[in-house]
Image (cartoon, rainbow, N blue to C red):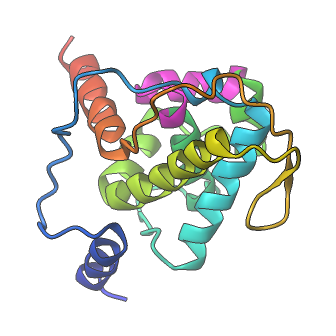
Amino acid sequence: MKINEKDDEMDKIMNRNNKTNDYRCNCNNSPPVNLLEIIEDRDLIHLVIEATTEVSAKGLVRRVNSIPDWVPHNMVLSLMTYAYATCKYSSEELAESVRKDPALRYLSSGIFPDVSTFIKFRRANAHTIVYALNNVLENVKGLCSNKAASIKTNSGISLTGIIKNRNCELAIDGEKRLGLAVMNDCLERDV
């Protein structure tokens, strides 16, 4: 599939009418919610894996030739989706957190991408990251409104169902979170 076809496919999925790569969000100015304030980390990990597996199955993850072969692109997508869902936007912070944070270490399977890997991947796969992140956000929003004692993901994984805060106003703000990541990396490079 050519790059433009992937863009067209992603635009259809995200119901985008404009083809700009402008990720500034015209949402309200409230900061994004750290999803770990709402659900357990185990549940968030399962939701991230499910969302990124779906995106990968659709063939929407672009291969970045400058990323080493030993770094799986799907794993990088999972790491970035989890990081942005938990309000970690800096690629430097993400690279460092993969070594320290148990959830990110689990998602990385012992592979530790560097800062440039995250930046290159984000440049090539911005739409894909937003799609996976919005999928996770929608699922968490659905969990908050679900009163069932047992909750399963689409792939049949049982979640703990522990909701820390059912009253949160959770926006589906993947583009805003991506914009914050771009801004953070730009500011780090300028300082």
Q: Nearer the viewer, residue 134 or 10?
A: 134
Q: Residue at x 30, y 78 (%)?
A: 12
Q: Could you say which quadrant of the image residue 65 lies in?
A: bottom left
> Where does the image place residue 59, in percent across and percent down from the top left?
50, 79
Question: Horizontal and vertical percent for residue 47?
Answer: 68, 50
In-front residue for pair 22/190: 22
Spot occupied by residue 10 in the image (x, y as percentages of width and height): 34, 73
**Is residue 150 left or right of 9 when viewed as pictured?**
right
Task: Say left or right for 78 vs 102.
Answer: left
| Residue 20: quarter of image | bottom left
Position of residue 168 in the picture relative to residue 131 (left or right): right
Q: Does 3 appear in magenta?
A: no
Looking at the image, which residue sits at the far top? Answer: 191
**The magenta stretch spans which residues?**
84-100
Position of 178 relative to 127 (above/below): above
Q: Quadrant of residue 49?
A: bottom right
Residue sitting nearer the eye, 141 or 106? 141
Residue depicted at x 40% and y 38%: 171
Q: Main secondary structure of the magenta part?
A: helix
Above or below, comparing residue 7 to residue 31 in the picture: below
Q: Quadrant of the N terminus?
A: bottom left
